[in-house]
Image (tube, rainbow, N blue to C red):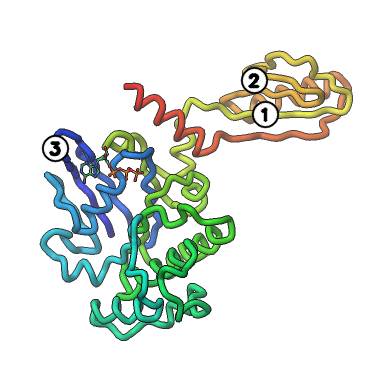
Amino acid sequence: MIEVKGLTKQYGNIFAVSGISFKVQKGEVFGLLGPNGAGKTTTLECLEGIRKPDSGELNVAGCNPLSDGRNLRRNLGVQLQSSSLPDGIRVDEAMSLVCAWHGVPVRFDLFKRFGINDFSKKQYHALSTGQKRRLHLALSLASNPKVVILDEPTAGLDVQGRAQLHDAIRNLKSEGITILLATHDMAEAEMLCDHLAIMVKGRIAVTGTPEQVTAVGNTETRIVIRTKNNSLLPGRDIGSARFIRATEEYVEWVCSDVATSVMDILKQVQAAGDTTEDLRVQKPSLEERFLELVDRRERK
Ligand SMILES: Nc1ncnc2c1ncn2[C@@H]1O[C@H](COP(=O)(O)OP(=O)(O)OP(=O)(O)O)[C@@H](O)[C@H]1O
């Protein structure tokens, strides 16, 4: 549904995007992650047809963003990072305007869906950040697009607003809409994305499912255990599990082979006639993997 091949974009002597390629399949949520200045917005703007790439081939829902603007506008919904409307425009007027621009009947049905009816008569300047985000998402769907691009849709939202937006994104996915999501929020990416790519300095550093991306890092899995008689204290390496620290009751190791290490530790507990009271296996998070990768690439 989206295909990017060898996309390059330079601003003067800054390589914002350096020959990146990726594909987004129909109906999936694809996350584009990266630190500030990694080239995410430039990539999205090229796909939206508002920025001209220096080289590369782009396809969005069967359209070339540069030469097929009319079809692209029908098939692609966009929620920009800096979306804005005139202060004095009313919410319902904004929807009428956008629908008229697309040449489609007015879509007040989207107000019900995104809980906008309560503030549909308010002026834009009087909306909260969360209300604005919901409105922009609704406006991006006015033409019933096959693909939606969301650039940091939950930035600045409170916990409830973020959860509402996440539900809305899941609903769009369940309707078969393809979503390209740029975000700084690792937990959001881990929860919502089927695949993701981490961009650093204009290149894709790693891509895959959130599990695949997390698994290829050097960050090891942690095993934390508390036993009845504290027989594992003061703590030492056991088999391939490397001892990290012990607090009053808990002992912590890191390991790469979780199953073997857990078994080795539990055997030790049993041999000491002790009982396990709490056992936690903590996989590295996408955030840890992201920090590890960005740190390594940015030092290059
Ligand atoms: N219009 C522009 N003119 C000159 N340089 C630009 C322009 N837009 C972006 N850049 C530069 O291109 C690089 C990539 O910027 P871009 O906005 O695409 O990154 P980003 O990953 O979206 O960052 P952020 O997470 O901060 O939004 C940065 O070095 C930025 O300073």
Q: Is mark 3 within 8 Å of ligand 1?
A: yes
Q: Position of residue 89 (x, y in %)?
A: 35, 75
CA–CA distance in space, label 1 to label 2: 8 Å
Q: Determine which quarter of the picture holds residue 266.
A: top right
Q: Nearer the viewer, mark 2 or mark 3?
A: 3
Mark 2 vs mark 3, CA separation in Å: 51 Å
Instruction: Residue type at mark 2: give it.
Output: Ala
Relative vertical location of residue 227 with respect to residue 122 in this rendering, above or below? above
Query: Residue at 31% of width from left, 68% of height from top?
Result: 146
65 vs 268: above or below: below
Verify CB contact (< 8 Å) between mark 2 and mark 3.
Answer: no
Q: Position of residue 243 (x, y in %)?
A: 67, 17
Query: Is there CB contact under 8 Å for labels 1 and 2?
Result: yes
* Tag shown at residue 241: 2
> Disc 3 designates what residue?
12
Determine the secondary structure under disc 2: loop
* Mark 2 sits near ligand 1, with its Cβ under 8 Å away: no
SS label for mark 3: loop
